[in-house]
């Protein structure tokens, strides 16, 4: 078996005295879509940020492509072509859409910038008409597309998506999930996806992990997890299938 | 009328100097949210470096004024930038993640250190510079009152305009400027995208200090004297200008500098010179009551 592209071993992260991650073990293999599901406050976003060293893991090791990145500064981690569309989207509000994309291309080879802009505009045609508009004036859904598009501009080897469907109309959420699959199948893009929309995420992903209170409690293929009664009870039943986010 | 035009010329000249210093306050505030109280003293250091450089060039027999000016500009910008870099690197960066007031207190400390250091190294007395740029033009005259536009005033205003134009271009159009704006809007996100935020913050201080040093040269040439205390007074005025224009806003700093220069000059000319600072600050207070974010500042709610 080959080395996983991203490997997280025994990672612990603290906010002050509060232990947010309590020894996480997790792998993402090249070409996979892996999802992490869990309730509010279980530590999903913390894990995404810990991969980028902010906050930094106080214990354990994170390796990417065989390289230990646990202590690397965030911007050097980005230079390894790991990209993130973070929680809250974090679009630069006073920059135009085009400038946001330019920021996304910070670590990319400038010679293929135009080509990459075309590529993300094909994925999200709405953005094309908004190129000169300021990021802060986009609608929530448009900002979400921009956040993903910006992350794609670096031609990432690993794409981290933190709740890309949050606050989106079901149709739009579906479209985002379709786009993720398309990127994965066509470009073999490796994706690590955090979602509360567990049903869709597990259907989309090759494998999934369940996080509870900073600990991984379950893992398996998407189908396996979908079938688990404890997953169904906690994350799927009771009308939670679609209604997250708003 | 002639008197008014004369005051206008003086006010614009003074406002240019304030504006150049104000840019440093506003940029640093924009990017790391702190008031760099030592910035006025960096301006003062810039003036002293320029003074020493002028005297040294005269001593080694550089007699061409344009060459001397150009060399002094280079030397002062480079060395003052080094001061700006050092202050950030050693006094502020280690405190960036500590509680909010720590860098502020450190900045006040740096301000005192720079003042005392120059006072000890250069003496407390006012230092004169022999007139370098002389000559002036009479624009109009009537009833024995001449409106004079001096060469030094022309140099101050043209240099300021040139610097502000090129600096605005840098911020709006270059990669570094874009990185600076990204850091200003979301430091953490910028780092996730691969921007080296330590380097970007350093460069912000370096550029701010270089602009302040040009203001220092202008001050020195314009007034012909300099002492260790000018940084405090000019610093407070420039800071006021930045707040008046809208702290964090680049055009705001330029506009605020101009306004403070004009207010101060006109107040001294028409009312009383003793109360010129009171006038500037009163107007600041009035503006802030009605426009809490300054004239060109953007309301905080826009930040998402
Ligand atoms: N900056 C912070 N300072 C202190 N505590 C924090 C901070 N960020 C998160 N936490 C705490 O860490 C825990 C995990 O938060 P995290 O944001 O990772 O959860 P999450 O799984 O992403 O939740 P959600 O689904 O609501 O986004 C929570 O208890 C939260 O209160
Ligand atoms: Mg979260």
Image (cartoon, coloured by chain):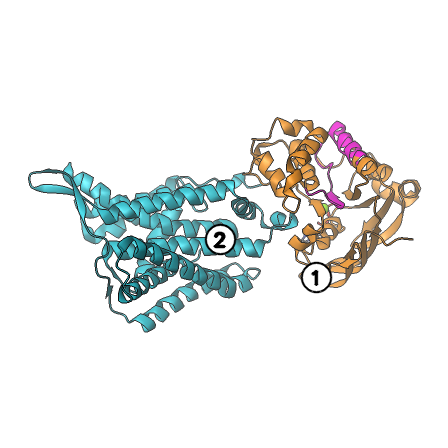
Chain colours: A orange, B cyan
Check chain identity for marks 1 and 2: say if they share one: no
Q: Position of residue B15 (x, y in %)?
A: 30, 46
Q: Depth check: B242 or A240 in front?
A: B242
Tally of numbered discs:
2
Q: Depth check: B80 or B255 in front?
A: B80
Label 2: chain letter: B
Q: Is mark 2 within 8 Å of ligand 1?
A: no
Label 1: chain letter: A
Q: Position of residue B129 (x, y in %)?
A: 24, 62
Residue B222, above or below A131: below
Q: CA distance from mark 1 to mark 2?
A: 26 Å
Residue bearing the label numbered 1: A71
Q: Residue furthest left?
A: B143
Residue bearing the label numbered 2: B204
Disc 1 element = loop
Q: Position of residue A172 (x, y in %)?
A: 73, 29
Q: Which residues fall within the magenta stretch?
A: A154-182
Q: Which residue sits at x=78%, y=41%?
A: A196
Q: Which residue sits at x=78%, y=57%?
A: A63
Q: Is mark 1 within 8 Å of ligand 1?
A: no
Q: Quadrant of residue A91?
A: top right
- Whether A155 is among the magenta residues is yes
- Asked whether, in this view, residue A242 is left or right of residue B106, the answer is right
Q: Depth check: B15 or A22 in front?
A: B15
- Asked whether, in this view, residue B106 is left or right of residue B159, the answer is right
């Amino acid at each position: 078996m080959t080395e996983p592209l991203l490997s997280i071993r025994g990672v612990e992260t603290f906010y002050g005295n509060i232990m947010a991650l309590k020894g996480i073990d997790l792998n993402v293999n090249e070409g996979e879509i892996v999802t992490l599901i869990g309730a509010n406050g279980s530590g999903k976003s913390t894990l995404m940020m810990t991969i980028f060293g902010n906050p930094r893991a106080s214990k354990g090791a994170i390796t990417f492509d065989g390289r230990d990145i646990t202590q690397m500064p965030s911007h050097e981690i980005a230079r390894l072509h790991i990209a993130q569309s973070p929680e809250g989207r974090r679009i630069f509000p006073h920059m135009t859409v085009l400038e946001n994309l330019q920021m996304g291309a910070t670590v990319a080879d400038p010679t293929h910038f135009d080509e990459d802009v075309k590529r993300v505009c094909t994925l999200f045609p709405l953005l094309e008409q908004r190129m000169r508009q300021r990021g802060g004036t986009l609608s929530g859904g448009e900002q979400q597309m921009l956040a993903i598009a910006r992350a794609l501009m670096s031609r990432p080897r690993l794409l981290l998506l933190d709740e890309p469907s949050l606050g989106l109309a079901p149709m739009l959420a579906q479209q985002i999930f379709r786009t993720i699959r398309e990127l994965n199948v066509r470009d073999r893009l490796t994706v690590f996806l955090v979602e509360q929309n567990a049903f869709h995420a597990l259907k989309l992903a090759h494998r999934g992990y369940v996080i509870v209170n900073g600990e991984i409690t379950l893992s398996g293929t998407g189908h396996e997890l979908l079938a688990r009664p404890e997953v169904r009870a906690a994350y799927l039943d009771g009308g939670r299938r679609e209604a997250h986010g708003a | 009328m002639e008197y008014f035009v004369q005051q206008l010329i003086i006010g614009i000249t003074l406002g240019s100097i304030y504006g150049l210093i104000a840019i440093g306050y506003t940029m640093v505030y924009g990017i790391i949210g702190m008031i760099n109280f030592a910035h006025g003293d960096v301006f003062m250091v810039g003036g002293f470096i320029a003074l020493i450089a002028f005297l040294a060039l005269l001593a080694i027999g550089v007699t061409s004024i344009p060459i001397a000016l150009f060399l002094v500009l280079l030397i002062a910008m480079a060395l003052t930038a080094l001061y700006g870099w050092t202050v950030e690197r050693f006094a502020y960066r280690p405190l960036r993640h500590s509680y909010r007031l720590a860098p502020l207190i450190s900045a006040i400390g740096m301000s005192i250190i720079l003042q005392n250091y120059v006072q000890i190294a250069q003496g407390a007395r006012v230092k004169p510079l022999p007139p370098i740029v002389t000559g002036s033009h009479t624009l109009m005259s009537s009833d024995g009152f001449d409106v004079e536009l001096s060469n030094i005033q022309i140099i101050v205003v043209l240099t300021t305009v040139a610097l502000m134009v090129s600096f605005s271009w840098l911020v709006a159009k270059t990669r570094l400027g874009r990185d600076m704006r990204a850091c200003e809007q979301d430091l953490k996100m910028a780092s996730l995208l691969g921007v080296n935020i330590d380097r970007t913050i350093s460069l912000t201080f370096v550029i701010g200090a270089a602009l302040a040093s040009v203001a220092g040269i202008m001050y020195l040439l314009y007034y012909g004297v300099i002492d260790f205390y000018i940084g405090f007074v000019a610093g407070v005025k420039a800071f006021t200008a930045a707040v008046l224009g809208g702290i964090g806003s680049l055009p705001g700093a330029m506009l605020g500098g101009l306004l403070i220069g004009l207010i101060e000059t006109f107040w001294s000319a028409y009312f009383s010179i003793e109360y010129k600072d009171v006038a500037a600050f009163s107007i600041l207070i009035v503006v802030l009551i009605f426009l809490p974010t300054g004239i060109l500042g953007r309301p905080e709610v826009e930040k998402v």
